[in-house]
Image (tube, rainbow, N blue to C red):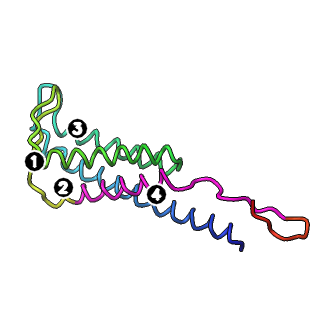
Amino acid sequence: MTDVETSARSYRAVRTALIVIVVAGLAIDAYVHFDLAKAYSPVKTSTLSQGDLFRAEAVVSILAALLLLFHPRRWTAAVAAVVAGAGLAAVLVYAYINVPRIGPIPAMYDAVWYTEKTISAIGEGAAFVAALILVFIPWGRTARTTVGAHGRAVTS
């Protein structure tokens, strides 16, 4: 096996591991949000409840995970990074800042860090970081190997 083949195999292994981390983090996020949605449904405005927003977050997380899993590309990693980053930002903002109601979005301040909230934030954070790495690491072939005039492998 040439150095180029070893390098390409290493990149594929790293990409695969990062995709697994992103998908797992988004799956954790979706599970927790679906699980908590009913408990947070009473927090609402006339049009939306926090439970509705939790369900939407869960669905978008599942879609982003499936998109990356079945169509692994730099742009699908970027989509996953946006979804995970937005989820993490929301949980951090609403944990530390008492944001008032914004139009149809209810006030969702919740300073208590209970187990499911913590697990969700960790999953979102891991998915966000892994997805960002996926956006910036090489995806294509790093070099081409051809056979030169003397029958030896030549890297270009």
Q: Position of residue 85 (x, y in %)?
A: 32, 47
Front of the two marks 3 and 1: 1
Along the horizontal axis of the image, is 5 left or right of 128?
A: right
Point 30% across, 50% down: residue:
30
Q: Which residues are magenta?
A: 119-147
Mark 1 surroundings within 10 Å by alpha-carbon count, few (fewer than 14), some (14 through 19), many (20 or more): some
Is residue 30 left or right of 134 when viewed as pictured? left
Dot placed on the residue nearer the N-terminal end, 4 or 1: 4
The residue under label 3 is 53
**Mark 3 or mark 1, earlier in chain:** 3
Q: Is residue 137 magenta?
A: yes
Q: What is the spatial separation of the Cα atoms under label 4 and label 1, in whole angstroms?
A: 31 Å
State left or right for residue 122 relative to residue 152.
left
Tags 1 and 2 touching, CB below 8 Å: yes
Q: Nearer the viewer, mark 3 or mark 4?
A: 4
Q: Amino acid at mark 1?
A: Asp
Q: Are marks 4 and 1 in contact (CB under 8 Å)?
A: no
Residue that carries the numbered disc 4 in the rendered image: 19
Q: Which mark is residue 110?
A: 1
Q: Name the residue tied to disc 2.
A: 117
| Whole-percent x, y for residue 51 in the image | 18, 40
Q: Residue at x 23, y 42 (%)?
A: 54
* CA separation in Å, label 3 and label 1: 15 Å
Could you tell me which secondary element the residue under label 4 belongs to?
helix
Residue that extends furthest to the front in the rendered view of this protein:
156
Closer-to-camera residue (54/16): 16
Q: Give x and y (percent) for residue 102.
A: 15, 29
Q: Amino acid at mark 3?
A: Leu
